Image: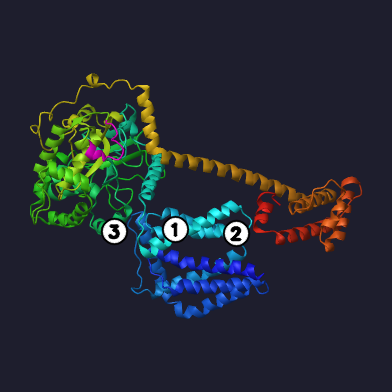
């Protein structure tokens, strides 16, 4: 008995002590050392009291009395502690899902928050004591599932040691419930994993030496990409890869992607995916932590009516409102493109409502809904990106409207220069050698913009050649360096990525953008309110740079696209390639790909996406298995319910028969040998005080089964009483594993 109590008391204390530590770490708080110690002591005391069995209500009464006694002292502090706790939780949530969240008024000191944590820890300690002494599946699920969900959802924001401690707690819960009766090999593996996780916790949580492994973040990105593909589809039919330069460029097809209708047809860049950060050969959006740090900036920008997505038209409204005389209503129907984005022009009007008013960053217009949006209407100005010089010159004039706009723009200007000028060291060294080692002078923000454009266009059109079938770089090679210094051949994605790095090298914020083009030829062929179908051939990747005051502007560097769109300036003399028409597609057909190349392509695709494929298949198989298991469980439960319903059969003989058969199944499940003998022969196997009653009920069953003598309610009640006695004793004596077998295998 003592060993059993010890086996339960110690787990209760450890499980209770983990709660304030995990909660404080997850929310970025500082929990005093006495809090987990006090929680552990109180939980151990409750477990000891509950294990006695004589006064199981005593711990609950003591805890209620303790809370009542502390209420006058803590009553005034708890509301402030609750506000501080909510603020901390919102801050952690913001690290994963960056948005502008409200902040509640909370005390500056930590006393109110500590008081609330103490109350929550006390309640958790009582719950831990109950769970450890009576480990039921439902109780363990209520304990473990929130912890597991927090570990998965909030993993990017939580420290690695927190994830390790959370996983350790989950393993501990398993061992608590099934440690004695489960598989011996499984117990060994669980304990080994617990030791490893504890070591990681100690190394990373308190020493700070361990860093988040790269595979953890790369795996999370791969899974996120796979989930997005399942939810929204992809743009591979348009030759777009979502910023991934490590794979061969997919071929553009004639698959319909967007249907565009305008009241005033004009050429547009329709911006979708925006690559903001470059690492490991892939463009990705800004990480959540960086966006969360800027949530306050965007809150005040929104208060001032400034939004990056509509900055171009907002600047025109302040400096050159005559450019906004044209109001173009653009309706888009997404027929084959990724529905994760609303493909919007740079000329999106300043008064256009956006789906998420509390978004942070606003690099692109994100769609709402589980599967995105397939049909939407936007309001835009005419094509004014070609008028950016006029807007910029007008902004320099000393007017009240310009001053108000530039005051708001200055905050976003700092954000752009802080986040969109990073260049990897190896690429910076290469560009320093090739672009004459430019460095900023004191007081200089960036290199001269016009000279930067000329240099970038000259270099790319002189030292690189364009192809629609860009090959994947060798393993371990940076795709941009491979394009600039290796193959020197690439598609629009490689040109745009290299140009973005060159802009950044010159100190100019730049990003890589994927979307679709409504070209000037398309606009010339359109009629007002008549739809235009954009196929995969209209997909395009380009670079955009930040023009101080004006906002983000597209810039073409890929030779076939230099004359496709309307441009604000002409660079016809930078090289012999600039200004040429796109190459003749009939004379530049790629040769037929042999089977060996197809095999190699499939092999490369498998090597690159195997993690995503395996995770997707695993999720599908797990979901299918869960559905099958749930269906089987429901069927078995219904069968048991129908069986027990027969206990109340109006035909008492049938009811006694059903009760006796159920009782025998319980006995067989508890270990009674299933011998082929008369019912009364089983009596010696029962407890002595039940033998005579069992013989009597067995005789009743034989009477109900084999005779026509009617039976009444006394016989039914007698059979039910014996059934309850046998079931109660069997359940109390059963170990946790045997209880699971009784409930979920035998369904008794």
Q: Earlier in the sequence, mark 3 or mark 1?
A: 1
At mark 3, the secondary structure is helix
User: Is residue 432 a member of the stretch shown in magenta?
Assistant: no
Percent of width and height locating residue 578: 12, 30
Taking the image as shown, residue 114 lies to the left or right of residue 579, namely right
What type of secondary structure mainly makes up the magenta span? loop
Tell me, for residue 164, which label it has, or none: 1
- Residue at (45, 70) in percent of width and height: 117
- Position of residue 160 relative to residue 433, above or below, is below
Percent of width and height locating residue 644: 74, 51
- Residue at (60, 66) in percent of width and height: 7
Q: Tags 2 and 1 in contact by the CB under 8 Å rule? A: no
Q: Quadrant of the N terminus?
A: bottom right
At mark 2, the secondary structure is helix
Q: Which residue is mark 3?
A: 293
Q: How is the image coloured?
A: rainbow
- Position of residue 36 relative to residue 217, above or below, is below
- Position of residue 717 relative to residue 572, above or below, is below
Nearest the eye: 658 or 241: 241
- How many numbered circles does the render carry? 3
What residue range appears in magenta? 470-482
The answer to whether residue 544 is visible is no
Nearest the eye: 176 or 690: 176
At mark 1, the secondary structure is helix
Q: Which residue is mark 2?
A: 177
Taking the image as shown, residue 69 lies to the left or right of residue 403, namely right
The answer to whether residue 573 is visible is yes
């Amino acid at each position: 008995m003592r060993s059993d109590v010890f086996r339960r008391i110690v787990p209760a204390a450890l499980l209770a002590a983990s709660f304030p530590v995990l909660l404080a770490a997850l929310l970025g708080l500082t929990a005093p050392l006495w809090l987990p110690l006090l929680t552990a002591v109180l939980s151990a005391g409750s477990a000891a009291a509950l294990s006695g069995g004589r006064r199981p209500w005593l711990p609950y009464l003591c805890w209620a009395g303790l809370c009542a006694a502390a209420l006058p002292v803590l009553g005034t502090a708890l509301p402030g502690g609750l506000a501080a706790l909510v603020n901390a939780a919102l801050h952690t949530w913001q690290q994963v899902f960056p948005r502008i969240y409200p902040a509640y008024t909370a005390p500056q000191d930590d006393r109110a928050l500590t008081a609330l944590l103490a109350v929550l820890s006390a309640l958790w300690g009582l719950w831990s004591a109950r769970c450890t002494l009576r480990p039921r599946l439902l109780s363990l699920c209520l304990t473990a599932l929130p912890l597991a969900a927090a570990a998965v959802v909030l993993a990017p924001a939580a420290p690695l040691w927190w994830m390790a401690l959370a996983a350790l707690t989950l393993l501990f819960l398993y061992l608590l419930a099934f440690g004695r009766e489960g598989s011996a090999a499984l117990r060994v593996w669980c304990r080994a994993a617990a030791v490893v996780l504890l070591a990681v916790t100690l190394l990373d949580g308190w020493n700070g030496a361990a860093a988040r492994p790269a595979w953890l973040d790369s795996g999370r990105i791969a899974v996120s990409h796979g989930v997005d593909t399942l939810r929204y589809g992809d743009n591979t039919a348009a030759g777009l890869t979502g910023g991934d330069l490590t794979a061969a460029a997919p071929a553009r097809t004639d698959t319909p992607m967007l249907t565009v209708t305008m009241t005033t047809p004009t050429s547009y860049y329709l911006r979708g995916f925006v690559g903001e950060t470059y690492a490991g050969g892939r463009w990705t959006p800004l990480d959540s932590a960086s966006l969360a740090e800027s949530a306050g900036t965007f809150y005040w920008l929104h208060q001032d009516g400034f939004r990056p997505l509509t900055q171009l038209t907002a600047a025109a409204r302040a400096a050159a409102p005559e450019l906004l005389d044209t109001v173009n209503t653009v309706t888009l129907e997404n027929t084959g493109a990724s529905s994760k984005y609303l493909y919007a022009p740079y000329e999106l009007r300043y008064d256009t409502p956006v789906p998420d008013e509390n978004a942070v960053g606003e690099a692109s217009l994100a769609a709402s809904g589980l599967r995105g949006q397939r049909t939407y209407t936007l309001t835009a100005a005419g094509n004014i990106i070609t008028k950016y010089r006029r807007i910029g010159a007008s902004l320099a004039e000393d007017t009240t409207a310009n001053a108000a706009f530039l005051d708001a723009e200055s905050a976003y200007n700092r954000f752009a220069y802080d986040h969109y000028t990073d260049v990897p060291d190896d690429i910076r060294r290469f560009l320093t050698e090739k672009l004459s080692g430019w460095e900023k002078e004191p007081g200089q923000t960036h290199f001269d913009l016009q000279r930067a454009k000329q240099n970038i266009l000259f270099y790319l059109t002189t030292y690189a050649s364009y192809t629609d079938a860009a090959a994947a770089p060798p393993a371990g090679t940076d795709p941009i360096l491979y394009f600039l210094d290796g193959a020197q051949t690439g598609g629009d994605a490689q040109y745009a990525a290299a140009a973005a790095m060159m802009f950044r090298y010159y100190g100019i914020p730049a990003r890589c953008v994927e979307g679709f083009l409504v070209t000037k030829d398309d606009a010339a062929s359109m009629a007002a309110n008549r739809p235009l179908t954009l196929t995969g051939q209209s997909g395009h990747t380009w670079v955009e740079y930040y023009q101080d005051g004006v906002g983000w502007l597209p810039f073409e560097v890929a030779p076939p696209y230099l004359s496709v769109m309307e441009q604000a300036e002409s660079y016809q003399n930078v090289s012999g390639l600039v200004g040429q028409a796109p190459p003749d597609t009939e004379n530049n057909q790629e040769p037929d790909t042999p089977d060996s190349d197809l095999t190699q392509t499939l092999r490369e695709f498998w090597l690159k996406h195997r993690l995503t494929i395996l995770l997707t298949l695993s999720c599908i198989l797990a979901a299918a298995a869960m559905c099958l298991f749930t269906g089987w469980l429901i069927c078995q439960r219904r069968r048991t319910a129908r069986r027990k319903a027969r206990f109340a059969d109006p035909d008492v003989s049938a009811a006694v028969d059903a009760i006796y058969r159920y009782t025998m199944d319980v006995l067989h499940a508890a270990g009674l040998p299933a011998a082929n003998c008369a019912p009364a022969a089983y009596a010696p196997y029962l407890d002595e005080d039940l033998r005579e009653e069992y013989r009597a009920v067995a005789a009743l069953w034989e009477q109900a089964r084999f005779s026509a003598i009617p039976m009444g309610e006394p016989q039914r009640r007698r059979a039910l009483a014996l059934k309850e006695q046998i079931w109660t004793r069997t359940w109390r004596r059963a170990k946790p594993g045997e209880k699971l077998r009784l409930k979920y295998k035998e369904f008794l």
